[in-house]
Image (cartoon, rainbow, N blue to C red):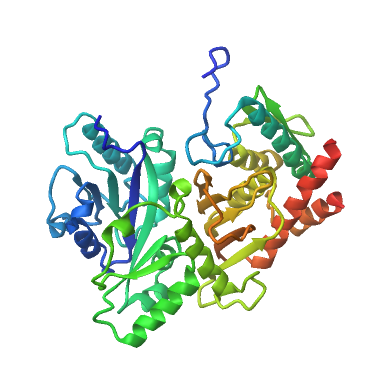
Amino acid sequence: MCALCGVLGGSDHWTDATARPGVFTRNADSLERRRERARRVTVANRILTHYGMRLSDWQGTAFMLSTLTGKTEMVENLTHLWTTAEKLSGRACDPLDPALLSRLDAASV
Amino acid sequence: MSDAIPQFTPVTLITGFLGSGKTTLLQRLLADPALADTAVLINEFGEVGLDHHLLERIDERTVLLQSGCLCCTIRGELSDAIRDLHSRRARGEIPPFRRLAIETTGLADPFPVLTTLHAEPVLKHHFRLGSVITTVDAVNGVAQLERFPESLKQAAIADRLVVTKSDIAAPNAVWALLGRLRALNPAASIVFSAAASLDAEALLSGSAFAGGTHSEAVSAWFAEAAEAHGHHGHTHDPNRHGSDIHAFAIVLDQPLDWTAFGIWLTMLLNRHGEAVLRVKGILDIGGEAAPVAVHGVQHLVHAPVHMQAWPDHERRSRIVFIVKGLERAVIERSLASFMALNGSAEAAAA
């Protein structure tokens, strides 16, 4: 736990697993961990823009999710991200939604 | 604490519909000297617990949970019971056990039990899910799968299916059941409890991807899925049946981007976790020499495992889904869009 802000560490989400023998993770060293978080923010924002939201890293321990109107919530991991995104946007964030996929495909060209 | 106690004690969940032979199987497994170091938790639905008497092994490592069905009313009691076993073992009050078996009630949904193990703050540091074993009765199994969604889900979620009562069932009934089980859950290995060669140790030990050392088991898992669906999965869909649960495999020739895959799967499971009964994959991740195995049950995904080698020297990603009501083509298209997204994101950042 961070003594200053009381943030609990070690969420052990599967995309962020604690480094231990046999487990695949990019949490093994701090540089790779930060790099992965930056990549995650970049990729997530390509999707979140469809819902009018934006993600940013917060202190390397959590993420901040904001709407265009400024509503902001902290999220701990990717699972928490999508439940919070649905709550803030009032929309279902569905990766199978053809409208979302068409937009992603257009952006990828 | 004894050296014999593993860092993570594997937990095997034994489930199966009412009367499908869970207790008989457990009784047989526990009689095997190789499994003498197994603690047992039995959940019974009803006023008077009986199964623990049937087991004929009443000791301090056998615990009965009988105040309700494990999946809905007594999850707190479940975690308390496991924690209690753990602390008594650590204090040396009970003989050390190296694995734990949990027998659920016949109507239980196995998923909440898995979640308890995965999420409970103490348990998750000392126990890990081994495998889910589901018993299916050869005499009544086909009818139960048709009529009871609980039975269907128990079979779909299994790592290992044990067909019971095959010695008293008509051969046609056994074949019909096998066909149904293969279609429903091509990923699970199927064994017969009547077989004299039933290997108790192999059945109860390990997990599908534990430690990345069981490449043969993983290979078999995917070989069966591939056989059922065509090599690239572009053939017919034989897994359609009365229910809308079906299984399919997606094969990807290009290396996967781990970041985009993580975002995609968490987003999919957040929205459709109830419908994704199982997802299991061997992934060829960009920048990684060895394959990475992922294994999820509904909303729950286990820590990805770094495997030691490609099981069949075929270096490409294979992901098997067992889903309820979701279309394969839609999932495939979605994954492809997300994978392409990463390339464009990196290009934009450059």
| Residue sitting at the far top | A4
Residue B281: quarter of image:
bottom right
Above or below residue B329? Residue B299 is: above
Q: Nearer the viewer, residue A72 or B243?
A: B243
Q: Nearer the viewer, residue B149 or A47?
A: A47
Can residue A73 be seen at all in this image of the molecule? no
Residue A82 in the image: x percent, y percent?
A: 64, 42
Q: Nearer the viewer, residue B32 or B72?
A: B32
Residue B161: quarter of image:
bottom left
Residue B225 in the image: x percent, y percent?
A: 54, 68
Can residue B176 be seen at all in this image of the molecule? yes
Which residue is rendered at x = 16% and y = 33% of the image?
Answer: B93
Residue A5: quarter of image:
top right
Residue B110 in the image: x percent, y percent?
A: 39, 55
Which residue is rendered at x = 27% and y = 43% of the image?
Answer: B98
Q: Viewed as shown, does residue B350 lie left or right of B118?
A: right
Q: Viewed as shown, does residue B209 lie left or right of B202?
A: right
Above or below residue B57? Residue B194 is: below
Q: Nearer the viewer, residue B76 or A15?
A: A15
Above or below residue A15? Residue A95 is: below
Residue B280 in the image: x percent, y percent?
A: 53, 56
Which residue is rendered at x = 71% and y = 41% of the image?
Answer: A89
